[in-house]
Amino acid sequence: MDPNIAVPTLTGAITVAAGQGRLRRQAGVTLTETLLVLALAAALGAVAYRSYSSAREEARLSDMTTGAIALIGKIGQFYSAAADYSGLTPEILHKAGIVPPQFRTVTDSNGTVELRDPFGNTVDINGTGGSYALAFRRLTQAACSSLATALTSIAHRIAAGASVTAANGVIDTGANGRIYKDETTSADLAGLVDGCSQDSALLAVEVR
């Protein structure tokens, strides 16, 4: 064999293959790191959303309690001279300017004025000669229990449950509703928990 003839080697091919292997390994590491970062970001986002939702729920619940107490106080002041709650409606509250900032009134397509709580749910209100009733709908169990206990000292009667009604300024438990407070019961917590835990429970408050 002629010593002057160049013999091709695999050095170049080996070098290229090694480089390609490193690139593949780097690409694999980069993809793995990216997926880990995305997973971590998703987890942090979920935690942040839950924290935000919880904080917003707590704020609305606080507004509900504060607003309900303020509303009862304003109604008492407005009717202090007459002491006759006949004809009490959301429209009267609106025209008298005694709806607290935590609550609002809206007019539906039929021209009827409705009272809404901080959660956006309709609050029924009606009166008779010596009393009036408020009915809070679609409350969570926590909101139902919290609102009831907050109003214990200023309400004459409080009841919760799916069959509870509030009409003509008076509340009624119906078949399955539970009394939390009335003339003979000061604070039946077991009854309150049972009433508030019922599906489609309504919290009714009677004030005199």
Image (spheres, rainbow, N blue to C red):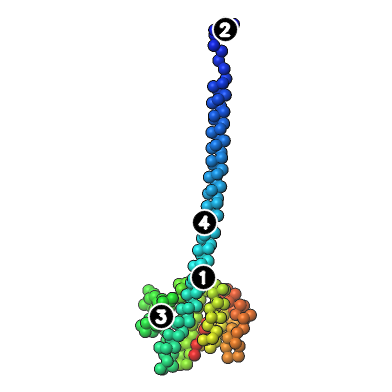
Which mark is first along the chain, 4 or 2? 2
Residue designated by label 4: 45
3D distance between C-alphas at marks 1 and 2: 90 Å
Pick the residue in front: 55 or 182: 55
Q: Identify the residue at image location x=54%, y=86%.
A: 153
Task: Indicate the amino acid at tag 2.
Answer: Pro
Q: Residue furthest top?
A: 2
Looking at the image, tell me whether mark 3 or mark 1 is earlier in sequence order: 1
In the rendered structure, which disc, 3 or 2, sits on the residue that comes first in sequence? 2
- Residue annotated with mark 2: 3
Mark carried by residue 99 = 3
Q: Which residue occupies 57% across, 73% down? A: 141
Can I make out residue 87 in this image? no
From what the image shows, is residue 12 above or below residue 106?
Answer: above
Residue 134 got which mark? none
Q: Position of residue 193 (x, y in %)?
A: 61, 77
Instruction: Identify which amino acid the numbered label 3 is placed on.
Output: Val
Measure how far apart labels 4 and 3 are at the Cα level: 38 Å
Mark 3 residue element: loop
**Marks 3 and 2, Cα distance to the nearest angstrom?**
107 Å
Q: What residue is rendered at 40% in x and 94% in y?
A: 81
Q: Amino acid at mark 1?
A: Glu
Q: Which tag is nearer the camera, tag 4 or tag 3?
A: 4
State the separation of the CA atoms marked 4 and 1: 20 Å
Residue type, numbered disc 4: Gly
Identify the residue position indicated by label 1 in the image: 58
